[in-house]
Image (tube, rainbow, N blue to C red):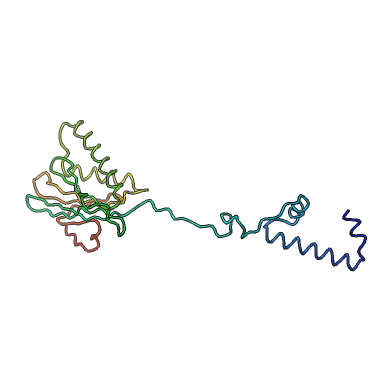
Amino acid sequence: MLMMMLALFSPARLEVAIILVFYNLRSLSFITGLRPLNCIKMKLLGIEGVGRKAELSDYSMNPHQVSFQPYQDNGGTTIGIAGKDFVVIASDTRLCNSYDILSRDVPKVFDLGGNSVLGASGCWCDVLTFIRVAESRIKNYNYTHGKEMSTSALAQMLSITLYRKRFFPYYIHNVLAGLDDEGRGAIFTYDPVGHCEKVKISCGGCIHGNDSTHS
């Protein structure tokens, strides 16, 4: 059929017709993103092509990307002060998410037994997970050794626990307060991967950038 139609054209008109067909195929190829041969097959089968900017927006050249944000800062501040034979630690009780106040009654100070208290703030789900892991290890230590863990041993255990999560760290600010083996007040601070430092005064959380930590 195609050969009979081409025979009706003069050589000049035939050349023009071939150029127009080729141009239409190239245009269709650009619109649909298909090769010219595939466009011919679609035309013979009666299938209309789908434009690049048509209803398949999910397959466009500029896909919408969503960043991975596993952490959420729920705010909070903890402050610890160590003295000759005492230690003081305090925290706020507000739990927030950006400008939203989720609760006004969420203390961030946790009794870990013995003479040790931990203040933790930041991503609240990480805080609860970290406290649960720490309490489990403290119970295991007490059962194995038949005594409570000292503040120095607890500081080391918390450092190891944080370091084990160094590739996906807990997003929390920790301030450990307690009495050392000689009965003197001690404050321990941590970075996200477990580095521990013994200080006299420290704070963590929202006002961490405005504090002054003294050895």
Q: Is residue 167 left or right of residue 153?
A: right
State the residue at coordinates (24%, 52%). Answer: 103
Q: Please say if 22 is above or below 145.
A: below
Q: Nearer the viewer, residue 191 or 24?
A: 24
Q: Is residue 57 left or right of residue 131?
A: right
Q: Nearer the viewer, residue 11 or 145?
A: 11
Q: Nearer the viewer, residue 15 or 111?
A: 15
Residue 175, image x, y percentages? 20, 51
Q: Quadrant of residue 158?
A: top left
Q: Quadrant of residue 211?
A: bottom left
Residue 1, image x, y percentages? 88, 53
Q: Quadrant of residue 145?
A: top left
Q: Can you name the residue that lies furthest to the bottom here?
A: 12
State the residue at coordinates (69%, 61%). Answer: 30
Q: Nearer the viewer, residue 116 or 55?
A: 55
Residue 190 visible in this rendered orientation of the protein: no
Q: Is residue 63 left or right of residue 196?
A: right
Quadrant of the rendering where the C terminus is positioned: bottom left
Total residue callouts: 0
Residue 84, image x, y percentages? 7, 52
State the residue at coordinates (58%, 58%). Answer: 60
Residue 148 visible in this rendered orientation of the protein: yes
Residue 59, image x, y percentages? 58, 55
